[in-house]
Amino acid sequence: MSAQHPQPSQSEPSGGPARSARHATEEGSPGRVPNAPGSPSPRVDIEEKAARSVGSGAAFLVAFLLLLLLAGAVAVLVLGIMDASADPDHVHAGVVARIVAGALGIAAVVVVATGFDIVVPGQTSVRQFFGRYIGTVRRTGLVFVPPLTNGTKVSIKVHNFETTELKVNDLDGNPVNIAAIVVWQVADTARAVFAVEAYEAFIRVQAESALRHVATIHPYDESGPGKTSLRGGTDLVSAELAAEVAERVALAGLEIVEVRISSLAYAPEIAQAMLQRQQAGAVIAAREQIVEGAVTMVDQALKRLEADDIVTMDEERRAQMVSNLLVVLCSDQRTQPVVNTGSLYA
């Protein structure tokens, strides 16, 4: 007699769970070690579908019919018991049949009554029949679904949370503290329930992971042309962050509505040095603007004096006037005029 070898189960890849990660990666199985964003392959391949259900009107009708059936079953059972009690020594088959029919009727009512459920607005009911997913109920109010099914309530309202403040190094290697607010909702209830263990904890972890990654590929401040900074390109960075979070949580049936950076600052150990650098940059920019304006004013003054033939100056006098005007216009302190009573060439 040949030995019968058990076939691999549906939840295990061929070869058993002891297969090495290297072997799994070479075969391209879902158990591969690298799980980069954009290429997640969930082991639970399931999508939401509508469960068979009827709305409030039909559900109330079913409830009314069940009440009538329950009343009739109770009456038949009570009458059968009374007849059996009246003459316990001569209980005929009809009495026994009434008792059995009444008991079966009550049991049937109890079984059918398990199909009633109440779904409030903003919630859904994910139905399972002895562990098998049969669909999701999105109707609201009193609904009637297949009996003997149990439901898991899943909220489809818009949720939001703020990530913890993370300390990461930006593109230039400077430590920064950053946090973000994530607005999300459940789009596929079946994936949210069956594809991940706890989808609320899952999205929090994935959001922090995406935030950490995005922060490391951008500088805090503008460091060159064509580079988007965390501080200067907030909208672009937020859009990039939202796209990355959405890509990571798609396998759990979650939809990202919006992601915004809520907190951004240099880490305390370098905050003072970076503040001084920012102040120095602001002073330099202001000086450049002052010098540019002063040169324009001096040029206009010289051209006006010569155009109106107010004074005739040689190159040395022009240089002297330019020097004086630039000192007056560019100085950050109040200047004291000096009146020259002699000749410039004395």
Image (tube, rainbow, N blue to C red):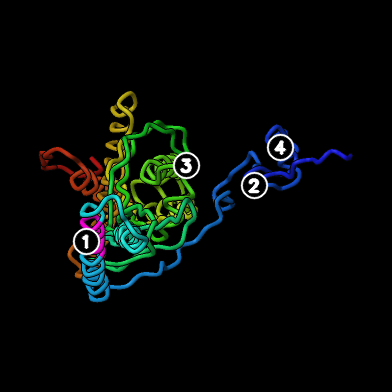
Give the mark nearer the N terminus: 4 vs 1: 4
Q: Is residue 142 above or below residue 44?
A: below
Magenta-highlighted residues? 73-83
Give the mark nearer the N terminus: 2 vs 4: 4
Q: Which one is in front in this view, the residue at disc 2 or the one at disc 4?
A: 4
Q: Residue at x 36, y 45 (%)?
A: 200
Which residue is under mark 4?
Answer: 16
CA distance for labels 4 and 1:
61 Å
83 or 24, which lies in front?
83
Give the mark nearer the N terminus: 3 vs 1: 1
Q: Which one is in front in this view, the residue at disc 3 or the one at disc 1?
A: 1
The answer to whether mark 3 and mark 2 are in CB contact below 8 A is no
Which residue is under mark 3?
Answer: 213
The answer to whether mark 2 and mark 4 are in CB contact below 8 A is no
CA distance for labels 3 and 2:
24 Å
Name the spot of residue 308 as percent of width and height, x first: 19, 70
Q: Is residue 331 magenta?
A: no
57 or 28, which lies in front?
57
Which residue is under mark 1?
Answer: 79
Is residue 222 visible to the viewer in this orientation of the structure?
A: yes
